[in-house]
Image (cartoon, coloured by chain):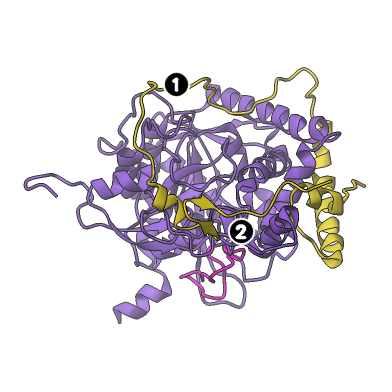
Amino acid sequence: MAAGAVLPLAGVPLAIKDNMCVIGTRTTCASKILGDWVAPYTATAVERLLRAGALPLGKTNLDEFAMGSSCENSALATTHNPWDPTRVPGGSSGGSAAAVAAGEAVIALGSDTGGSIREPAAFCGVVGFKPTYGRVSRYGLIAFASSLDQIGPLSKSVEDAALVYDLMAGKDPCDATTVDRPVEATLGGFPKDLAGLRVGIVRDFALDRLEPDVRAVYEAAYGDLQRLGADLVEVALPTADYGVATYYLIAPAECSSNLARFDGMRYGLRAEGADVLETYERTRAAGFGNEVKRRILIGTHALSSGYYDAYYVRAQKARTLIAADFARAFEACDVIACPAAASPAFEFNAKSDPLAMYLMDYYTIPMSLAGVPSLSVPCGYVTPQGSDKPLPLGLELTAPLFAERLLIGVARAYESGTQHAAHRVPPVLEASAR
Amino acid sequence: MAEIDVAYVARLARIALTSEEVVQFGGQLEALLDHVAQLEALPTADVAATAAVIPSSNVMRDDVPVPSLARETVLSQAPRRQGNYFQVPRIITEE
């Protein structure tokens, strides 16, 4: 560190989701297949924060290869929700969300492919921000679904998320998908209220599908937006209902291709067989967990001869319609508000059926498919029957492509006008304060 | 009801499965395929496919050599190595 240098993150403890490379440290993706693999270089997003003075505290747990919504698919560790340890932290960036919620790290990095920053942020009562696709370099992020993956911050406040985003965003020669377009700073000059802002409420995400107590929190959140000066306008996303179906063809197809590199030849686990084919098959059988296998299988099927047009191409066309829905909606509104998840954090083993788990990302997947920036900000609490532990809920706010500054400003005005995150702290922090 | 030949797909994907796993994954993947069948209701006939929402093509850089990882760094994590080579199973068989 040079004398007199101004480091915006000097001494700030940073937790890093363990699918991002940090030179000289194990990077596991919470998978057995990487074994004791040590990263030989550092991810650009991490590097930019370290250069700004952040102190890397450690790596955080995730669903294996970021495939999951609860962290239960980690092959290496269990992460509990700091609000109620009998419940999951969400996923796949559950370790990062839990670390920030429990006060172990001030900021954390996550990656979001279909909701993997926003859903755990909602479950753990922190801010989780997925920028526009292509805004933050993925160099050094171990790929899951390359047309969707995006790195973003998890933090206690919108302001912290803005600070981290501003430092990370921008073109990187090492990631050809980063967009060569000036980054609009999001930090500072925050609006005091939402006067004149048109907030789109999605007709197709009717709140009457939710449990009454959850519904009441979101109705109150929409009321708060109005109280802060916003005009609520109804917008339609008629194809958003097809998001999960579209996503669970595109993401597995891309994952089946990306994960083909894990073959036991150059690094990681190798389970020897009688010949090269058997070595591949045994290595991948021993190294991947069930959810990763399921996604590789469905993706391989969707890309295979005879099924490619019926599954993969059809899903890509549906993606076009979903993105067009957002473009149309943003003609009538400035940002969209909706739940980040249909429920608060659930108990371990509550979603043993894979499809039930996939539907947890119902509200986050459409934004990922459209590539638009989206975040979750704490918006209230519900206490499940028979429990004395309040669980946080997240309001998901979404803006047009590259409108990060607008999005952060709205989230910040909502946050300071409601103070939900400041109202309560997780029981683990209450205990340590005593 | 959608069908998937799990044993065949697993061979394509280079994953060894037990017969129990073939049955278990088969049921789960067929349930997912039944769910994605709803896409057939969407009017996609005249719609272009989206591969990436922010289109880019042929991103080039200057053709100048830049340092890459040291050979020892790359080879040091090989499951098996022989000198400066990755040691891999034989891939050519005699007829």
Work out how far the residue at label 1 is from the one at label 2, CA to CA, in angstroms.
45 Å
What number is the disc on residue A370? Answer: none
In the image, farthest residue toward the right = B1
Magenta stretch encompasses residue B18: no
Q: Which residues are magenta?
A: A69-89
Q: Is residue A153 visible?
A: no
Picture layout, residue A219 above or below residue B79:
above
Q: Is residue B46 visible?
A: yes
Q: Residue at x 67, y 60 (%)?
A: A283
Q: Which residue is mark 1?
A: B60
Closer-to-camera residue (B79/A168): B79
Q: Residue at x 74, y 52 (%)?
A: B14
The amino acid pointed to by label 2 is: Ser
Would you say A127 lies left or right of A216 here? Answer: left
Q: Residue at x 69, y 52 (%)?
A: B90
| The chain coloured yellow in the image | B
Closer-to-camera residue (A316/A127): A316
| The chain coloured purple in the image | A
